[in-house]
Amino acid sequence: MSGRGRLTLYGVAATLLAACSLLPLVEPAAWILPAAILLAVQGGAGALIRRAPVPRTLVVVAQALVVLVLLTLVFAREQAVAGVLPGPEALRRLAHLLVSGAEDVGRYATPAPATDGIRLMLIGGVLLVGLLVDALAVTFRSAAPAGLPLLALFSVAAGLSEGGADWLRFLLAAGGYLLLLLAEGQDRLSQWGRVFSGGAGSRGGAGGGVFSGDRPTAPVRTGRRIGVLALGVSLAVPAALPALDGGLLTDARSGNGKGGGTVSAVNPLVSMQDDLTQADNRQVISYRTDSRDSQGFYLRILALDTFDGSEWRPSTRRLRDVPKRLPTPEGLGPDVRVTEIRSSISAAPSYRQTYLPLPYPATEVAAGGKWRYEPAGRTLVGDRGETTGGAQYRVSSLVVRPTAGQLAAAGVAPPALRQEYTRLPRSLPKVVHETAAKVAKGADNDYERAVKLQDFFASAGGFAYDTSVDSGTGSTAIVRFLKDKRGFCVHFSFTMAAMARTLGIPARVAVGFTPGTPQPDGSMSVGLRDAHAWPELYFEGIGWTRFEPTPTRGTAPSYTLPDAPSSEASAPAVPESGPSAVPSAEPSVADDCPAPMRKQGECGSSTAPGAAVATDSGTPPGTVLGLAAIVLVVLGLPVLPLIWRLRVRRRRLGFSAGRTPADTTARTLAAWREVIDTAWDHGIGPDDSLTPRKAADRLVRLGRLGPEASAAVHRVAGAVEQVLYAPQPRHDTGIAGDVETVRAGLRESAGWRPRVRAVVAPRSAARVVRAASERRASVGEGWAARLRRIRWTGRLHRPSRRRA
């Protein structure tokens, strides 16, 4: 294997080893496999491009384009042109995933679920670091600075992991970097042959190689310094970054010694599956209630109301102070029968999460601590670190009993609400629309359509409850669920909500707990395996209404059953009398904690996830325009040298036909510069020390020019000597044709690769960089002269000090 090939392989290996430090941040860790494959493709593309005689900058640009195509192929294939090329739709899709990934990073605690947005950020970040490592170590032949992007990758993992970076992963990352340095050292030594050094301890001997005398050479010294910097940053970053703990339905144990730390308990998007399969249904909530319908007493956490095609997520609204009595539930009319009940709820000290579990819809909440109210979802959110750990609170809530007739006669939802809660991504497969239309065929109203959907999942459709199915809430998971007909509450609730939206029924997904298990003392015990998700559909006049599509879990509401009463005298809300029950004793904390779950929401003093935004304008136009501009710049960079060269050639050969001596001199010298640059583009570098005649002889010899082209180049050289040394410059009207003849001769004698490079990546474009450097130097010298002049003038005019 060649030296560059070995460097490429070691660069890919070093990046992959450093990327392993990110594995504890996301579950499942299957993203590392596609990242490794794409990283290898990226490195191979760079190796192939470097085989051609192209500028090093062009190699990096081409690899960046390969990265963009690879990310489009993996994350935006449906929106790409021909399934591969990143068009405007694909760029919008990637931008949307990046935005959602950034939101997920702020929402979830580690280990976070592998959502599409997080996967794009992980894989794209690894590819970007791999590109930088390959560019520094292989393309620009400087492996020592390549440790900096590897350090950045490891530092991100060190700062975000809850327990800090694992020492084994640090050794893997450091080992990859050392392999890269070793490969570069071997490559450098192989270019000099076998190295013979002087005696041990000799100074100034004929030593060489990696060590010269007693001191290592610059690459090794640089690598050593970067290694020391990596150690320092890896120790300092975890201490500087804040810890990420708490979150939706999180269950924490804190303390010193054994069993310390924070453990998440439930995440409906991914981690609810782990809790539903726990061998020990550890109690997290205990409550007493005077409700007569114990099976309908669901404890609700929050609602997921935004579906972007990748997952269901809560939106963000402003929070308010908790009112003494919560307002009337949205959409609830005066004719619907309701009963007000009272409940006392106690959370385990180890059960810490930012949302307060409440029966829906709550009307009064008496809870100590700092809580804020989110009106759209009717949820209470902890403020400034407030959690449910050890909380004891009293709640008044309504039991809403609509009749089937009232639901069937429900009016049309308000336009704003209907628009917000029926929004679906364009990427939702047609099979979801078609299945929903087929199931609801023959229904006369939204209520009948909703009942048909519930029955389709709960009994008629042949679905089975299975917690071993991989969890997922995106379009792909919905299609797979409809095909395989196996899943748990996450699949049933999210799929029914999506299908309801296709039918024009406003829908969202509620997350919380089923009623739990009765205890001998009359209380109810809620454990981790009671975690649940269910759809809520909106009916004007009734409000948000619970449905239960998941078989063997929870209970179907009475108004969805076949014998549901079609008409019943409605009654106003009648609060039940009697003091609230005393909450049960605090549940004991088991010694074992469940597998880590995710953080579903984070709330500050003014905003928190929990409800949807009124309108969704999609990806901001500024983001789309910015990405489009970046793509145009990236695509335009390779052709800039070509455009510059054509422009310069046209200007040099297009001088006005003036006959003054100055015109003749300018035209002739411009033609000579064009000949020199054309030869440079074809691999014959300029030599400014030669006279025009000697330069012409050199060009004929190295360029292997034929008789016609040789005569043309000598004529141009003679014209240059004539305008430089003759008393009166002679006008030559055919000099532009001679330049074209020389150019054609150079092209004819060169191979196809030099010809292509002369057009696509002309070497003479380096004059632009040289001119910019000279201009920058001249400007700097000018400012330095001005400053010296100002100082000198100040000294001349400075008044002398005399003693009185």
Image: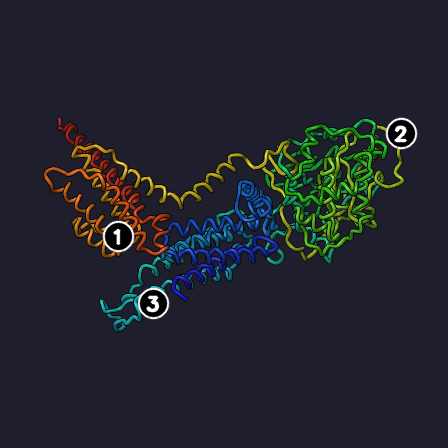
Instruction: Give the secondary structure at mark 3.
Output: helix
- Distance, label 3 to label 1, CA atoms, is 28 Å
Q: Secondary structure at mark 1?
A: loop
Disc 1: which residue: 685
Disc 2 marks a residue whose amino acid type is: Ala
Query: Residue 320: horizontal and vertical position, in percent?
Result: 64, 31
Q: Could you tell which of marks 3 and 1 lies nearer the N-terminus?
A: 3
- The residue pinned by badge 3 equals 190
**What's the mark number on residue 569?**
2
* In front: label 2 or label 1: 1
Q: Residues within 10 Å of mark 2 (few under 14, many from 20)?
A: few
Q: Earlier in the sequence, mark 2 or mark 3?
A: 3
Q: In the image, what residue occupies the spot 17% across and 43% down? A: 719
Q: Amino acid at mark 3?
A: Ser
- Nearest to the observer: residue 152 or residue 338: 152
Q: Position of residue 448 (x, y in %)?
A: 82, 37
